[in-house]
Image (cartoon, rainbow, N blue to C red):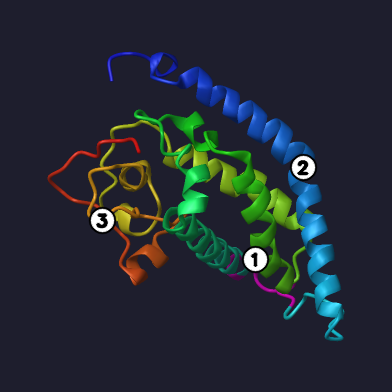
């Protein structure tokens, strides 16, 4: 675009969401919510005589294998949560705030209702606990890798990513997640980092001869 990123529509509103969701919700409440979720879930399992969430401890495995497993689990859980946000009329009332932008920018990744993070992120932590990761491990993963990728996929950059679109979630593929000129009404491209689950379940969408029109 000819104008700068600071001039795009809703730039300053998105910046407000970055400050409120990252500095207030994540920094002050996210870690606590995960810890409380773990405590409550353990108490529930205790009724059945189960005293730990850990099923297998991969902390001593090869770091590369650990990272691959983390990405697979993270994106599977995010894909399922994202799918529910689009398919449930009740949850969509909250999630459509994220889809309201008609122009994307890096800060658009934080343009969402805080309840999304309060509900889904703590639940997504549970599979990580089952493979031996602590709340702090998960917290650090979320505020580094997951946050970086969120800002990246919402960048308003006109780049053709080619075959990478079929491996990782890029600004080109994620723009179609925010588009309203798609087949059906429930969305496409639900994955957050890689595109394995969208390709497997048939939700990957990247037409060659169309331009995404953003908005609800």
Whether 132 is drawn above or below 150: the answer is: below
Mark 3 or 2, nearer chain start: 2
Q: Give the residue at mark 3.
A: 184
Q: Which mark is residue 29?
A: 2
The residue under the point 78% across, 69% down is: 41
Whether 38 is drawn above or below 143: the answer is: below
Mark 1 or 3, nearer chain start: 1
Q: Give the residue at mark 1.
A: 63
Counting from the top left corner in percent of width and height, residue 13 is at: 52, 21
The residue under the point 66% across, 44% down is: 143
Q: Which SS type dominates the magenta stretch?
A: loop
Which quadrant would the C terminus be assigned to in this image? top left
Q: Is residue 85 magenta?
A: no
Do residues under tags 1 and 3 come within 8 Å of each other at their CB atoms? no
Left/right placement of residue 165 relative to residue 7 reads left
Residues rendered magenta in the picture: 57-65
Q: Quadrant of residue 172?
A: top left
């Amino acid at each position: 675009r000819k104008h700068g990123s600071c001039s795009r529509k809703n730039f300053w509103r998105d910046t407000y969401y970055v400050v409120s969701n990252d500095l207030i919700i994540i920094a002050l409440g996210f870690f606590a919510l995960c810890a409380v979720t773990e405590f409550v879930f353990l108490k529930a399992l205790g009724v059945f005589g189960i005293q730990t969430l850990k099923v297998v401890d991969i902390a001593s495995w090869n770091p590369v294998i650990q990272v691959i497993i983390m990405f697979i689990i993270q994106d599977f859980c995010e894909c399922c949560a994202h799918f529910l946000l689009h398919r449930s009329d009740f949850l969509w009332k909250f999630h459509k705030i994220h889809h309201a932008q008609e122009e994307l920018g890096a800060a658009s990744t934080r343009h969402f209702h805080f309840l999304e993070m309060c509900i889904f992120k703590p639940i997504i932590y549970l599979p990580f606990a089952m493979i031996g990761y602590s709340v702090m491990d998960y917290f650090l993963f979320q505020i580094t890798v997951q946050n970086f990728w969120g800002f990246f996929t919402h960048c308003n950059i006109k780049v053709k990513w080619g075959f990478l679109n079929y491996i990782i979630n890029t600004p080109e593929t994620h723009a179609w997640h925010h588009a309203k000129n798609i087949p059906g009404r429930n969305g496409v491209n639900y994955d957050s980092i890689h595109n394995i689950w969208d390709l497997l379940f048939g939700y990957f969408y990247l037409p060659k001869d169309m331009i995404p029109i953003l908005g609800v």
